[in-house]
Image (cartoon, grey):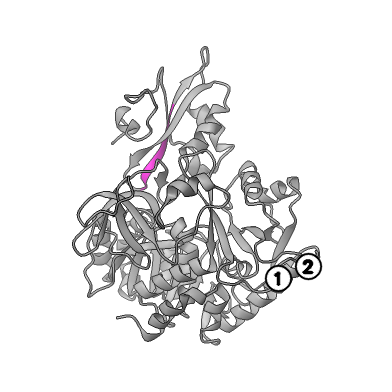
Amino acid sequence: MLSFCLRRELKRMTNLTVRRLVDKNDAEAPAILAEAQHPLSHGQLGQHIDATVLALNQFGIGRGDSVAFVLPNGPLAASAFLSLSCGATCAPLNPSYREEEFEFYLNDLEARALVVEEGSDSPATAAAKKLNIPILELKAHGDNAGAFTLQGEPGKAPTKGGLAEPDDVAMVLHTSGTTARPKIVPLSHRNVCASATNIAATLRLQPQDVCLNVMPLFHIHGLIGALLSSIAAGASVHCTPGFNAMKFFAWLEQVKPTWYSAVPTMHQTILARAARNQDIIDKSTLRLIRSSSAALPPQVLAQLEEVFGVPVVESYGMTEAAHQMASNPLPPAPRKPGSVGPGAGPEVAVMDEAGTLLPQGDTGEIVIRGENVTVGYARNPEANKTAFTDGWFRTGDQGRLDEQGYLYITGRLKEIINRGGEKISPREVDEVLLDHPDVAQVVVFGMPHPKLGEEIAAAVVLAPGSSASEKELRAFVSERLADFKTPRKIVILDEIPKGPTGKIQRIGLAAKLGLAG
């Protein structure tokens, strides 16, 4: 049963903003935690948000203005997201990007400012300077986790200052697709607060809960699945520098979290080190473990439950839904290994190509609608035409619903590569490889990987008289794209296999080339 407070929030979520989520909580209760720092309470977080919004306005930035941030994982990234989103449109970027990537994203976002840590040597600063984008420096302030001040040049009063309203865009994230240009997903305060409240309800989060966040705070999983869901419940989140298998069990012992959320590869790494940390596990305060962003093998779910003695909840999410769409519930409701559970917030259905909703048991495209779903991609009417049908958002995933409404994902209709939760656009890597003078033709595709689910592979046809090696081509890509986008396998061929109509088909190419395991 949902608590009275969570039921009330579900009814009120249409009026929520991140600031209002914070304001409803016990002002003295801890919100943001970090090693060797004092907790930042919910009351202090609210004051910090107000001060940050005032500073943004003084720099000439207001509601609707895009502000990118590039920060290492930790309490500052957490409070930056919560604060910046209340006075502008927050755009978290992956710190591992190269300068060329930062230049693309900052330009595509039409960023009004870039926020970095004081003294940062991130290549994002060089990209911002090239584009004449103002740089705001974030300086840690005091001993409280996540407290900071912003430093920058004063500007003209913004068109819309003050605190954000429910329909203002809280953040934008890029999502990779099958086209060369990633799509921008705007998520309003209404979207992110609805999703966070849904997750808090699914996990039955209470103010006394402590989340150990090991997820990156530039992805929807960490930002909403761990951080904002905790804020929605009036609970606290301990912000780590990021996942570290060597430190995980020390954190488990010191932080005493009640739950954590991670991708399957992280869970597998934790299990590999569990036996030597049995004494810490025996004293663990965990009451649940959550998994999302990629399919959790049933064997891993069973191992986790056996080792930690707590229920494992697998959830299904995506950026366009502000994360959670479906989730296996906590006991005593049934959890079905292999299923991602029933809809957990939005309505979930299955649709055929013509737009007809299908009955339970039939396989088709998974579609969703609800308060947490984006209203559409930014500045991309063509993508929106194909993404929405009669108010339903087409996920691009294939699946079926059983007689109890539990969702089973049977495949992906999209060609994006899901590398352990990192989504990569094959076309983006295609175009980088095609910039190499020795490459005449290329197709990037996903190949099976035992731990990551998928790994990046590429089939290349060299230009006549060229002799580039796989090693040289991989090095070429790694100089231009983040490491997780670099193909781990490049096959050099005389001709790339084509489908019946003469088109190159990414799906199934791994099997055709003998890379299917």
- Residue nearest the viewer, comparing 362 with 488: 362
SS at badge 2: loop
User: Is disc 2 surrounded by few (<14), some (14 to 19) or many (20+) residues within 10 Å?
Assistant: some
Q: Nearer the viewer, residue 78 or 267?
A: 78
Q: Main secondary structure of the magenta part?
A: strand
Q: Is residue 385 above or below residue 318?
A: above
Q: Which x, y percent locates residue 71?
A: 61, 59
Q: Disc 1 designates what residue?
A: 161
| Residue holding disc 2 | 157
The quadrant in which residue 146 appears is: bottom right
The answer to whether mark 2 and mark 1 are in CB contact below 8 A is: yes
For the image, the number of numbered tags is 2
Amino acid residing under circle 2: Ala
Which residue is at a point 55% across and 33% down the rendered structure image? 432
| Residue 132 image offset from top left, x and y in percent | 76, 49
- Image position of 11 (left or right of 402): right
Residue at left offset 41%, top offset 46%: 419
Q: Which quadrant of the figure has residue 491?
A: top left
Q: Is 138 displayed left or right of 320 in the figure?
A: right
The percent coordinates of residue 241 (x first, y second) are 53, 62
The residue at 22%/75% (across/down) is 332
Mark 1: amino acid: Gly
In the rendered view of the protein, which quadrant contains the C terminus? top left
Q: Position of residue 115 (x, y in %)?
A: 67, 60
For mark 1, give the secondary structure.
Answer: loop
Circle 1 residues within 10 Å: few <14, some 14–19, many ≥20: some
The disc at residue 37 is none
Q: Report, in whole angstroms, how far the alpha carbon at label 2 lies from the one at label 1.
A: 8 Å
Can residue 421 be seen at all in this image of the molecule? Answer: yes
The magenta region covers: 452-459
Q: Residue 343 in magenta?
A: no
Q: Is residue 254 visible?
A: no
